[in-house]
Image (spheres, grey):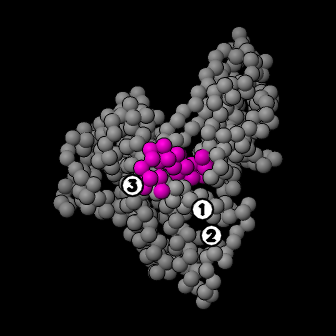
Amino acid sequence: MDLNKLIARVKNILLAPKTEWPVIADEPATVADLYKNYIVILAAIPAVLTFVKLSLIGVSMPFAGTIRIGIGSGLANAIIGYLLGLASIYILALIVDALAPSFGGQKSQIQALKTCTYAYTASWVAGIGLILPLGLSTLLAIAGGIYGIYLLYLGLPHTMKSPQDRSAGYTAVTVILAIVIGFIVSLVVGTVVGVGTMAGLSSSSSSSSDVKFDEDSTLGKLEKYAENMEAAGKKMEAAQKSGDSKAQQDAMAGVMGAVFGGGAVESLAPDRLKPFIPESLGGKPRTNISVERNNAMGMQISEARASFSNESGGSIDLEITDMGSAKGLIGLANFAGVEGEKETATGYEKTYRQDGRIISESWDRSSSYGHYSIVLGERFTVKVQGNAGSINELKAALGEINLAGLERLRGEGVKKQ
């Protein structure tokens, strides 16, 4: 490992990414080279400093002082997180490679690994901030994540040969998948370390099979999520051994459905979604409409969009989305208790639950512009946004949609596992 070369690469990708990505794309490399000369070193930064923060420095908690976890648990957390992090980079690279044709790119596993490796540089380096106070470390982590997205956007046209005008979509899908993979890694680390810690504190010899959670609780749903992942993985393994391409395709769809927590779901066909778009909304006639169903790696998401306007200049945009196999993300948000409120000098934005549904709304008085959205059946999202006299006008407009009829379709296309 050439330390000077590594430092130069880090410096160049962070400070001059536009000129460094073409160099990266053209240089020869192997999986082993990328791991031993770059990934294993930089990925160790957040792992090591996480251990230092949790076990040596400690975390300051209001009313509780400084809290530290044991050296053993801290090391377990760092080591398991580090190893899973190394694996997750390769998994994400495989997905980036598989997605390439969908965004006009060229498949290449080594180029995909280069893409993920160097795009993650900012986040790895930002891991230095873990030893800083919580507020500063959080800001640095956010900055590293945002800059990593920018690096990914710049790199895809060079490494995966995707057209520049399609790189934004390619980037967005990759980022979503990276978040999901990161969530799973965190879940696994928390589960393994948590079990180990409890084992050290308890002399009980009862097995994990003796522990059951309420299926409607957060832990119960996470337990079910893990079971679905395990089942999907076994089906994928069996399909690969069979050599049946159709079975492998179906198994991949099942894996992706398990990753997103929704199982295998066929989203609504355009002609099933279109009837929920009215001819007029809020007293304004419809001026355009588009309905489509997209498929990537066995996952389907359907979306209907329409605009409504009148001669006075008022306009409302409507979006109806069927999350398909990704509907599990809505379920995760639901039981995770995603709620919040923020006020500014000119308006507000808030997310809350009402009658078991997640609702999000925002309003800006200075521009008389806002949005109002609702989640139905942990699968569909319906959103209206635009200029109006008040947020109540947008709420009334959304109320004109056949929400009950759409919610009744939440089980359509759901395949038995």
Residue interval drawn in magenta: 238-264
Find out whether residue 198 is within the magenta segment: no
Residue 62 is tagged as 2
- Do residues under tags 2 and 1 come within 8 Å of each other at their CB atoms? no
| 62 lies above or below 329 | below
- Do residues under tags 1 and 3 come within 8 Å of each other at their CB atoms? no
In the image, what residue type sits under mark 1? Glu
Looking at the rendered structure, the secondary structure element under dot 3 is helix
268 with respect to 146 (left or right):
right
Where does residue 404 sit, x and y in percent of width and height? 80, 36
What's the CA distance linking mark 1 and mark 3?
A: 23 Å
Residue 227 is tagged as 1
Residue that mark 3 sits on? 89
Q: Residue at x 33, y 36 (%)?
A: 106
Looking at the rendered structure, the secondary structure element under dot 2 is loop
N-terminal-most mark, 2 or 1: 2
Is the residue marked by circle 3 packed among few (<14), some (14-19), or many (20+) residues within 10 Å?
Answer: many
Is the residue marked by circle 1 packed among few (<14), some (14-19), or many (20+) residues within 10 Å?
Answer: few
N-terminal-most mark, 1 or 3: 3
In the image, what residue type sits under mark 2? Pro
